[in-house]
Amino acid sequence: MVDHVHVHPHDEIDRIAPEIYGHFAEHLGRCIYGGLWVGDDAEIETENGIRTDTLGLLEDIELPMLRWPGGCFADDYHWEDGIGPREERPRRRNLWWAQGREEVFEESNAFGTDEFLQLCERLDTEPYLASNVGSGSPTETVDWVEYCNFDGDTDYANRRRENGRDEPYDVPYWGVGNENWGCGGKYDPGDYALEFRRFAQYLRGYDRNMGDGSLELIACGHTTESWNREFMAGLGGDAHMVDHLSIHRYYSGGDAVDFDEEAYYKLFSNSLQLDGDIERTAGVLETYAPGADIGIAVDEWGVWHDQATADNGLEQPQTVRDAVSAAGVLDIFNSHADRVTMANLAQTVNVLQCLVETDEESAWATPTYRVFDLYTPHIGATALRTVVETDEHEVDADTPDVPLVSASASHSDGGVYVTLSNRDLEARTVAVDTGLDAAEAADGAEILFAGTDPSEFTTSDNADSFAAEVEQVETEGGTVTLDVPASSVVGVHLE
C-alpha cells in the first residue's frame, strides 16, 4: 500500500514564526550548571564560563529563541541575586529542583541575567525571560526590564553599565509568571487574571513611557479549556494586554527504552493531544478576544519518561522514538502556523527531551537535535496546507488514534520543503503529491534513523551514527515517491 501526502502549494496557512522552533533552559538538574555553565576555572575549554563544546553544537543549529530561568524556578527567583561580581552574589535555595550535585536544592547564582543574555547574543537567539509572579512583585519585574532594556540615566541602567554592559539588551519577550495554576502560586484562574492585569499594567506603562513599545507579554494558560476560559473572562476588557497565551504539554510512553509495541504507539498518541490543546485554546481566544492578535505559546513541551525524576535532575535516555515524536509535534505546529506564535522544547541540555547531552569531558547531539536540524528550512517559511492519507493505529479510547505517517510542508524562495515521519514499525512507501506540474528533488532526501531501532539512544561514543543519510528519490511529474524506513524522519527540497 502507498501512503499519500497532498501538498497544496496555493493554500497558504501563514508564516512559520521562527520562535516556534524555540527552546527552554531552567535551573534544573544539569541543564545550566554542568551542561551550559562550568565557570572560568573549569578543566574543559570554556568561553566566558560557557562550555565551548555545548556552545558549538548550539551554534550549529538555528536557535531562534531561548526561555529562561524557568519553569517552576522562575517564581522563586529574584533576579538581583544573579547580577554583579559573582563572588558577591548570594547563595540561595532552589526551592523546586535539585542541581545534580552534593549541595542539592542550592543555587549559586553564578549564572544570572548578564550571563544568559550574553549567551543569547553569542547564539544570535531571542531571549525570553520568565518573571516572578508567585513570590515577586510588579516592581521587581519592571526593575528587571529597566536593567535589561533602558538606555537612560537611572539606577538600574547604570548598574547594568557597572556590570560591564553599556548598551541595552532589548529583551522582547516577558512571561508574566509560569504555571501559576501550580508551582507558580496555586492561583485559580480568576485570581491569576487579577495578577496578570496588575503586572501587565506596570509593564505596559514602562513600555509606553520609557521603552519603544516592543515588549511582548506571555500570559500563563493551561491545557484545561475551562481554566483558560475563566482566565480570559477575568481579564474582561483588558485582553489586549496579552500578546501570547501559553500552554504546556508533556507526554510519555512509560519507560524510555524498555517498551513494547503498544507503549511505542502510546507515546505518539499522547503527543497528538497537542493538536487538540491548540484547537481548544484557539477557540477560547476567538470567544473572549475576538479580533485580538493573541498568539498561542507552547512554551514547554516534550517527552517526560518514567526515568526522569527530581532525584536525577529529570534526566532520561534520548531515543529515536522520542525524536520521531518531536517531528510529529513540529508538523502540528507548522500546520497551526496561523495560531502558534512560539514554542519551547524542554529542555536544552541534559534535562528531559534535550538537544544536547554532556559529561565531564564532552558534549554530543541527541536524536531530537537531528530532527530540529532537519526541520530548519521551515523556519520563517510559509506553511502550506498538507493532507495525509495513511493507516492509523488504534491505541485506546482515551487518546487519539495514531496516523502512521505525519507530514508538513512550507515554501520559500528555495522552493517547497516537505518533512515527514514514519511512525510505523515497518517501512512504508509514501507518494508526495506536490500540486505542481513538475517537481524535482535534485539533492535527494535526507533520512534520519534508517535501520535504527526506536529504543536506541545516544551516548558520547555513538552520537555521530544518528546523523542523516541522503537517498535519491523517484520523481514523476508533480509526484515524489519515497521508501521511508520504519521509525524514521525525512526531509526533501522540491523545486
Image (cartoon, rainbow, N blue to C red):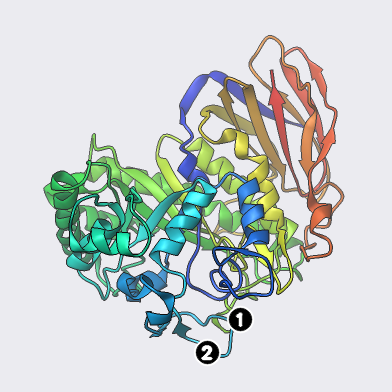
Q: Quadrant of the N terminus?
A: top right
- Residue 343 spot, x, y in % from top left: 47, 50
Residue 178 or residue 398, whichever sits in front:
178
Q: Is residue 13 above or below residue 315?
A: above
Q: Regarding mark 1 in the picture, which secondary structure is present there?
A: helix
Q: Is residue 495 left or right of residue 134?
A: right
Residue 99, label in figure: none
**Amino acid beneath label 2:** Glu
Give x and y (percent) for residue 184: 33, 72
The local crowd at label 2, few if under 14, some if 14 to 19, many if 20 or more residues have their Cα within 10 Å, is: few
Which residue does the image show at 72% across and 48% down from the upper left?
Answer: 423
Q: Which residue is mark 2?
A: 103
Q: Percent position (x, y) of residue 331?
A: 58, 41
Residue 40: x percent and y percent?
57, 71
Q: Quadrant of residue 355?
A: bottom right
The crowd level at tag 1 (other Cα within 10 Å; few <14, some 14-19, many 20+) is some
The residue located at (48%, 59%) in the rendering is 249
Q: Mark 2 or mark 1: name the one nearer the start of the chain.
A: 2
Residue 191 horizontal side relative to residue 450, left or right: left
Closer to us: 51 or 21: 51
Q: Height in image: 278 above or below 347?
A: above
The residue tagged 1 is 312
- Image vertical order of residue 186 relative to residue 213, above or below: below
Quadrant housing residue 481: top right
Q: Amino acid at mark 1?
A: Asn
The residue nearer to you, when weighing 91 against 152, is 152
What is the tally of numbered marks visible in this picture? 2
